Amino acid sequence: MKYAYYPGCTLRASYPHVDMSLKSVFRVLGVELVEIDDWNCCGSTAVENISEAVSLALSARNICLAAKISDTMLTPCTECLLQQRRVLYIMEQYPKVREKVLKVLEKVGLEWKPVKVVHPLEIVVNDIGLDKVKEKVKRDLSGIKVVPYYGCLITRPYGSEHPLYPTSMDELFSALKAEVIDYPLKTKCCGATLTATGDERGLSLVYQLLKDAKRRGGNVIVVPCTVCQFNLEVFQDKISTMYGENVSIPVLYFTQLLGLALGLSESELGIDKLLVPFSISAR
Amino acid sequence: MSREEVRIGVYVCHCGTNIAGVVNVEEVVEYIKKIPGVVVARHYVYMCSEAGQNLIKQDIKEHKLNRVVVASCSPNLHENTFRRAVAEAGLNPYYFQMANIREHCSWVTEDPKEATEKAKMIVRAAVERVKYHEPLEKKKVEVKDKILVVGGGIAGISAALVCANAGKTVYLVEKSPSIGGMMSRLDKTFPTLDCAACILTPKMNEVASHPNIKLITYAEVESVEGFVGNFKVRIRKKPRYVIEDLCVGCEKCVEACVFKEPKFYDEWSFGLKKRKPVYIPFPYAVPRKAIIDPESCLYLKYGRCKQTCVEACDRNAIDFNQKEEIIEVEVGAIILATGYKFIDVSKLPQYGYGKYPNVYIAPEVEVMLNASGPTRGEIILRDGRKPKSVAIIHCVGSRDENNKKYCSRLCCMAAIKLAHLIKERTEAEVYNFYIDIRAAGKGYEEFYKRVASEGVRFIRGKVAEITDVALTPEEEGKLIVRVEDTLAGVIRRIPVDMVVLMPALEPATGVEEVSKMFGVSVTEDFWFLERHPKLAPIATFADGIFLAGCCQGPKDIPDTVMQAEGAAGDALALVSRGYIELEPNIVSIDPEKCSGCRVCVGMCPFGALKYNEEKGVTEVIEALCKGCGTCAAACPSGAIQQNLFKDKQVYAEIAGILAVGGE
């Protein structure tokens, strides 16, 4: 299994430990990741306000470059994933926009070639399969109460699971013998960029998520989304003070917890870099 | 053929101004008169009137006519009228041809000149064609005077009783151990709040005791052969392991069962209560006989049990050696009343069914309200509490682009009824969450207004989710309904103790096999397809097979009974006559010309063609042929000719049309 790997700015700059865990886990699972040469921004930021064609062409360029490596591209950052899937959709459905993007690509000497864009969770569950993952388990996760939280970007609108009630992480961690908590808020809003201003409207959303995860007895929240991981992790102290309630709970990218089950060390998975510490021995 | 002199009468109808307002009928008559063979040509204001028909009859006698053409409307409307008139004058009715100059001409051609020219062509084609018509006879086929009803819910029961009261033998086949269907679960019915059991049980008992009804429960139709009037049906009756003739329903066996506590899923109560392996489906079951479930009975499953039930039965009714039984019947008509089921709402995770114990589906609550149910009519939650607030959610899966696009029709009224009953028995605050209230029935709107005035709350909005995540202390321990109140324009969170979901209806399990077995078409949602949505809502495209109740689409009890009794009427009309006449426009195969290639066999949609191995030619089963003409068109050797559409007739018609254009 060979995938064209697109880390994006998040994994390169703000979440290098997710990048580490991902590579470590896929090495153990026998998945080859080839980083796309000379990749650029996914275009999901403010670019669209300046030029729609440029913002779409940014991801279109990455997709064309990925096609040189594999017919499937791996994008762990859900913001990038959404933008890339959006570009694939628009290129197929909107011929007029497509023409504009093709012109931009032509200027850099690229020919449009769509690839399939997947999230690492989809590779683990669909491409590798839980049976194969189970074979590689070195220490199971029994005793850990896992709260799977999916957020919105991976589920809507281009997700492959039920948009309101995905279950792939539930199944994955059940297979690893963790105690998976049925978490009704699994696709509710994490506050997204509302939290950036420190506004209570954003933080109250995070508060609900953390509070309910703890109320249901969770030891750890697992996420497939770096935006969620950021929001759920970063503001815990502030929220605890604001609401006069301890909401502290570790938040792991799903490959970090999966990696522990596969026998990888905490440093190989970047778990030592988490803001809220987590240790499998201190369950 | 050695032909007598052809003497044709042609009648051009004005149809008031429908035709004459555009077509110059006098000009058409003048033109037609000149065609060789035409003896009389007239126009008249309404040919279908008695005076118009008399005109034809008179001319046949006076002018010794032997062919008749009427140029008027579509043959769908009046072909039979004119054929009858021709026959009454002593002529074979198939010496008649109809020319459609209304739907095909005056209604669709604006310019009077063009319309008149077109009318001339159409009439001339008919005149040329009718010259080659041959006398035909309708074939009579005997019809068996027995009727099969499939499904023993209120639809099947109603249909069976009407047929039986008319003196016909009825076989009523029911899949489950008792008749009664969905209605047997209800406590009260809308809008009159009649006690369901009080109105249903007399009918169920009447079915059981009716001398003309052969009730076959715990059985399914296995195969159907034959055609309208002559169906051969095989029914597979599953073993009950209790001899029905001996069992008196005393329940001693149930008490004596080695399972002291009931612990198995009870079908009648949708699992709300449990049953033992030996059980009586419900107190007023018909037949009220015990049944042993082979899936849970220790003896039947593992071959080891003390068989305390056998000991307890003083009538020796228990028979573990009972085998499946095949019953063969011959019937003239079939009524399908296979009903519906509810969709699996656990597939809609936003409503929390199966996750939160206090989320119920409506049929469970119906059983709970039923005096024969597990709580004897009380509303008691799974945790033993009485609810202080209840939310009823309409359109769960109905009117939903992601699920069933259709309206399930009975849920609005059922929800309002449940609201009334729940409020009456618990004094709880009851909320209805609806998209639109559909109360289009006799007394329905009044019932809705009445329940609203009783203080039941109605909130217009599609519920987004049911959650147990509390945001405020008041919400703690409650189920919270999140909804956009579209009348007030606000998002609401309403905490309640109990949620009742009104699930969409879908056709009963096995509908695909049933549709194939009986040759009945289905809609895209697998409801059985009626012959015409307005004018033939009971008949199907399979002659002799009629529909009753929800198998044709969601409907409430009044509509179900109406359709069921209508189906009985249709079935009786068919079997009472004792015979059916087959239209003579069927095909015949010339064995001299048939090469036995069998191209036609696969094309016939009615299975009317059969290859005769011995003779090496294909033959027609006349009773099955519908005269569609597909095979006649496909036959490479021209061996298949269809009555009324023989090659020479069709060619003459074409020649008739072209002749006008050429002049």
Image (tube, coloured by chain):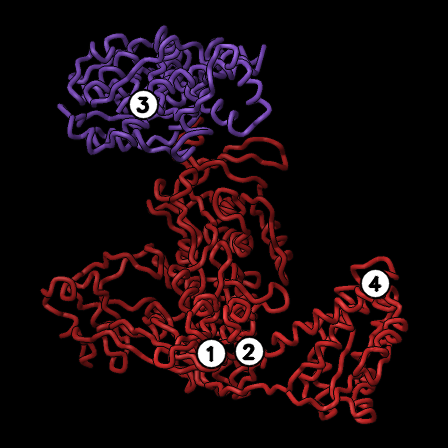
Chain colours: A purple, B red
Measured as percent of width and height from the top left, residue A12 is found at 35, 8
Chain name for mark 1:
B
Please tell me whether residue B322 is drawn above or below residue A197 in the rendered image: below
Mark 2 vs mark 1, CA separation in Å:
9 Å
The numbered mark, 2 or 1, whose residue comes first in the sequence reads 2
- Quadrant in the picture for the N terminus of chain B: bottom right
Which residue is more in the foreground, B595 or B254?
B595
Query: Do circles 2 and 4 both sit on a common chain?
Result: yes
Q: Which residue is mark 3?
A: A120
Q: Which residue is mark 1?
A: B620
Q: Which residue is mark 4?
A: B115
Measured as percent of width and height from the top left, residue B113 is found at 88, 61
Please tell me whether residue B507 is drawn above or below residue B169 in the rendered image: above
Q: Amino acid at mark 3?
A: Pro
Mark 2 vs mark 4, CA separation in Å:
33 Å
Q: Mark 2 and mark 3 in contact (Cβ < 8 Å)?
A: no
Q: Which residue is mark 2?
A: B586
Residue at the image position 84 percent from the left and 65 percent from the top: B117
Q: Amino acid at mark 4?
A: Ala
The numbered mark, 2 or 4, whose residue comes first in the sequence reads 4
Mark 1 vs mark 3, CA separation in Å:
63 Å
Chain name for mark 4:
B
Which residue is more in the foreground, B574 or B491?
B574
Apparent side of residue B483 relative to residue B441 in the rendered image (left or right): left
Which residue is more in the foreground, B619 or B308?
B619
